[in-house]
Amino acid sequence: MPNRIFTELLNEQIRALRDSFSRVSRNVFYDQEKGQLIHPGEFGMYREAIFQDFLQFLVPRRLAFDTGFLINANDEVSNQCDIIIFDAHSTPLIQSGARQRFFPIETVCSVGEIKSVLTKDLLSDALIKLSRLKAMREQIPHPVILKGHPSGFNPQTSHYDQLFTFLICERFDFDTSIFMQDKIGYQEHGVPHYHRHNLILSLDDGIVLYYDENGKSMMYPIHKGKELKTRIVTPGEDPDIHIKYFAVYIFLGTSSTTILYPDMADYLSEFSGGFNLNQP
């Protein structure tokens, strides 16, 4: 039997999300007479903050939110990420003088991109960007699991060891059949199936996810070694059903992602051959 309190509070969060993301953000940052955005950067930051508030209702309290860049011990750095969800208890504060934050890939569990109207080109660019973040997590020289499955770290075969990535927009500006036809840019860039996104949410149009051989919806592109196909859950009698799907899956995804120990010695060239505590 559904929990009435949780259902009502989630519905309230969804109403606030829809109103703030669509109506309020445009009234504040859009010049109706000129037909253009005022301060596009602030508009984007406002929408990122709206979704952070919504996500805080859904993900475990041990996780925190920010924007910034991902780094790894292989001297790779990502483009700026709209939403980074990370383990607050094990992430050092790596910050520039201009307060740009850099997050070790080991303690990040999820990354999301926030868009307004999503075109096919913007979709492809965002998904390729997210796939590259998953590839960065495979470049960890000495993975030590802080939270996760003790059977070893292998992001190529275990979806729990991968970053959980998502893309959110207000609406799609293209024919959504490209999802089922697998024409969203992955093949052109040679992206392996296990580097694909986990969830794509359009507030107006529905949620893009996967399904297994039994027709069960999944948030992972590979399950039990099989590459899964894509489906879209669209609004129906319940106009918010797709957002509720997202709520359930974002909790499952962020709560089960493996968290690793960020060995700072691996990030320093002086200790690239190993850290010896007996050295002076």
Image (cartoon, grey):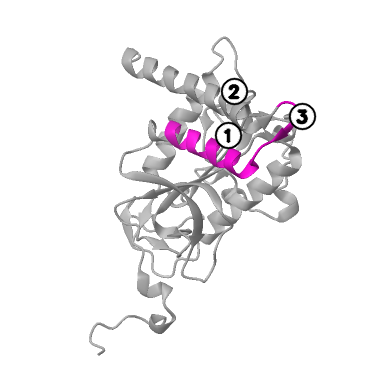
Asked if residue 202 shows in the view, the reply is: no
Q: Residue at x 60, y 13 (%)?
A: 236
Give the extent of the magenta segment. Answer: 32-54
Q: Which residue is mark 2?
A: 23
Q: Residues within 10 Å of mark 3 (few under 14, many from 20)?
A: few
Return the x and y of residue 19 as percentages of the image width and height. Answer: 54, 21
Return the x and y of residue 20 as percentages of the image width and height. Answer: 53, 26
Q: Amino acid at mark 1?
A: Tyr
Q: Residue 53 appears in which quarter of the rendering?
A: top left
Q: Residues within 10 Å of mark 1 (few under 14, many from 20)?
A: many
Q: Is residue 173 left or right of residue 55?
A: right
Nearest the viewer among 44 and 250 is 44
Q: Is residue 219 magenta?
A: no
Q: Residue at x 69, y 48 (%)?
A: 125
Q: Is residue 52 magenta?
A: yes
Q: Quadrant of the N terminus?
A: top left
Q: Which residue is mark 3?
A: 175
Q: Which residue is mark 1?
A: 210
Nearest the viewer among 77 and 209 is 77
Nearest the viewer among 108 and 138 is 108
**In contact (CB < 8 Å): disc 1 and disc 3:** no
